[in-house]
Structures are given as C-alpha cells and as structure tokens.
Amino acid sequence: MSPRPERSKADRAKPDRPKATRSKGGRKAERTEPIEPERTELHLVESDAGHAPVDDDGGADGGAVVTTSGSPVQDARDLLASTDPVAYYKALSGLARQGHHAVLEPLPYRSNLDFHDPTCVVVDPRPANTDTIELFANAAYPDFPWLLGRFRDPVVAERLDAVYQLVFNEGANVAVVTNHGQIIDIALVGGAMIDAMCSAGRTYGVLGEQIEVDDLADRFNVLVSRMVTTRMAFNVPAMQVLQVGARTFLSVPQTHSRRRSKLDPALARANNQLMRHELDLQLSEGGQILAMAASGSQDLSVAVEMVQKIKAQWRQMRGAEPDDTAETVHLQPLYDGTMNMMLGCRFVLPIAVSLDPTHPALEVGSLTRVRQKDDCHRIMEWIADAHQQATGLPTLYHRQEDDLLTQVRAVVKT
C-alpha cells in the first residue's frame, strides 16, 4: 500500500458531494468559504499526544522522532512504513484491557483495511444518515434515545446553535471535551451530538438553515486510541462505525498501558508525530470540531470504603469528605499535548458524561474561550463538578500526578 503523502492545505480541499434537498422546513446551509477568524498559530507537535510520557529502557522519553532526512514527519512515515504490519497490529491489540466495553470484540488483522496500515493515522468519514447513526448507537447503548434527548434539551440546543455559528459561519475551531469514562463514550456522545444537529426539522437562525450528516462529518473530527482499529462491533470494524459521522485521528497513548502492550516506543512516537501533523493540517482549515476524551487515561472509580486511609488527602484537596456509601470517581490529569489542542481550537464545549446505567448523566456546559493552560484545567474541574452533581458520586479532577491519585491507582490494581 503506498504511503499517505504529505498534504498541503489546498490538497485537503473536499470534493463537492451532491446534496439531497429537503421538501419541508428551512433552507440548506450554504457551503461557502468561512470567514477566517483571528486565531493563534497551531503548533501541535509536542512531546505527547495528550498523554503523560513514560520513560523507557534506553532513555526514550516520548519525545520527537529522531530526524535523519531533515523532516521529522517524513522520518516518522518512513519508520511506520518499514515496520511489520502484523507485529505492529498485535502490539496495538495489547493496549486493550479487561473492562473495555463488551460491545467491542477483537478484530483479526486484514491487509485490505487502510487503517491496518501502520502509516494510516487519519481515517476520513464515509457519511451515512441519522438513521444509520441511531442503528449503531442503539445497539451499543440501549438508552441512546435518552442520550439524544439530552442534546435536544432547549438549553443544550442553544449551545449547539452557538457551535454551528462559530464553525460554519465564522470558520472557528471548537474542541468538544469530555471526561474519560468507558472507551465508547466519546463515540456515543459524538454520535448523539451529530444526530441532534442534523435531525430533520433542526434549523439554525431565523433563516432556518439546515445541515445534513455529510455536511457535519466534513468538519467533525474525533481523537481516539489506535487500539480501536483492532476492535469490531456488531461484526463491523469499529473504525467503519465511526466513519458514518466523523473523521478519526489515531493516537498511541504514552501512558503505562503502552508499556504493558510491549509496543516499540519509537513506533508510538512516530505514529503521534505523523498524526499531529495531519491534525494540524485539518485544524488549520478552520471551521472544525475536535471531539476528545481529554484526560490522559480513563477515569478511575473506587469504592470509598477501600480508600479510607486517603480521606484526609481528599478533604485537603476537595474541602469535604466523600459520602461513605458512594464510590469516588477520579479524573486523571490533562497533559501538554491535549492542552495545546484545546488552546489551538480556542473554544471548548465541555461535557460531563456517565453512561453507567446506575448513574446516567450528560451535562453540556457553555461554550468557553480558553487562553492559557490554567483555563484547560478549570474546564476539567467544571466537568468534575458537573459529573458529581449529576451522578451524586464524589468526583475529583487531578491537575497533576499527586499522592492521592497514585494511591487510588494502587487500589484499582489490587
């Protein structure tokens, strides 16, 4: 398979698709060039892909790819192209762990799937319609109608109106940021958001503009672990399920799960270098949505009675003791790569989500302008507070690797 060539901004122009006309209700949103907003330069090539770097034997630190050709991006592409795709795939499969959603099952390696090529770091959308989105979503999460209903709440609908105006009419980028619950949460949240924004009869502004899934899919980007390429759902590759509504960027976590999988750290760095290059190009076009579960690792849920010995630390950080009858939820830290993406987008739509059937919750915050890294941490603190209020579970966001988080991780592992 030939490697994906480096693309300029002009190269990434999308071909016009024939659009279905609607017989009722407002007019179709015009696909005109967006007004270029004033925005900061995007420099997404950092030392991680939104995850904490893990030191490796031999001194690897999760940093940039060593340059031999003079182009780090080309070196990354060359390294990935030279690796054994089957061995690489097996190592990626090791990122999966017990507790990942039961809907996801192992997918055998297939050389005819583009996203099983090590050099593939972005998978373009193949838009379907809202019926297809709902078909997959209902199969994965039977309570999807409730989730979709939350996005149709009048208050949330107004916030989606603001997202539409920024993205489609002003050419601004918006990061949709959630906490990191189950691995399929971001796909379900993204699917519900796309469905709600593109449903028949959904209009924007007094002129009644409408958009369809293929309009939004051109602008809707999801950042996920590359491990997802090794899974299938309903006998369909999980990546093809994501393609019905979004473009997907594939990262390799630089957390301890990467070490556990025995994945070569040089390959992890090369993947992330190339992925960030492609993501930088996409966001530089403007008018993009980037959806991601922002924390470096999945949220940790621990029964309070198991962590009595660390209640004093909780009280110091949170100002109150957790309820003895509940479990506590810990949102793990943001790292520089993720914060740089949030700052590059400039606008963030924060979402607190829990798809646990015993504590279902979805809270969508106000569209927020972020200017510095502290703003990104405050976004996560809002998500933690909203999660706690909606679920009744004491929830704490950790700004950094602290003693409390270390002890919680130790409890989870036992």
Image (tube, rainbow, N blue to C red):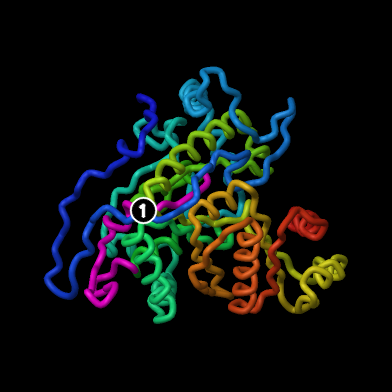
Q: Which residue is mark 1?
A: 36
Residue 55: image location, x then y, percent:
73, 35
Q: Residue at x 73, y 55 (%)?
A: 400
Residue 360: image location, x then y, percent:
54, 74
Q: Residue at x 32, y 56 (%)?
A: 35
Q: Quadrant of residue 122?
A: top left
| Amino acid beneath label 1 | Glu
Q: Decide: is 257 above or below 266.
A: below
Asked whether residue 198 appears in the rendered view, the answer is yes
Asked whether residue 237 appears in the rendered view, the answer is no
What span is in magenta? 197-225
Q: Decide: is 407 above or below 247.
A: below
Q: Residue at x 80, y 75 (%)?
A: 319
Residue 259: image location, x then y, percent:
67, 37
Of the pair 192 and 50, the residue shown nearer to us:
50
| Direction top: furthest residue | 68
Q: Decide: is 23 above or below 241.
A: below
Q: Decide: is 140 above or below 258.
A: below
Dot 1 lies on which element?
Answer: loop
Image quadrant holding the C terminus, namely bottom right
Of the pair 261 and 174, the residue shown nearer to us:
174
Q: Quadrant of residue 282?
A: top left
Of the pair 165 and 312, the residue shown nearer to us:
165
Task: Reply yes or no: does residue 113 show up in magenta.
Answer: no
Image quadrant holding the N terminus, namely top left
Task: Reply yes or no: does residue 208 show up in magenta.
Answer: yes
Residue 206: image location, x then y, percent:
25, 77
| Direction left: furthest residue | 23
Position of 18 with respect to 253 (left or right) is left
Q: Residue at x 70, y 34 (%)?
A: 61
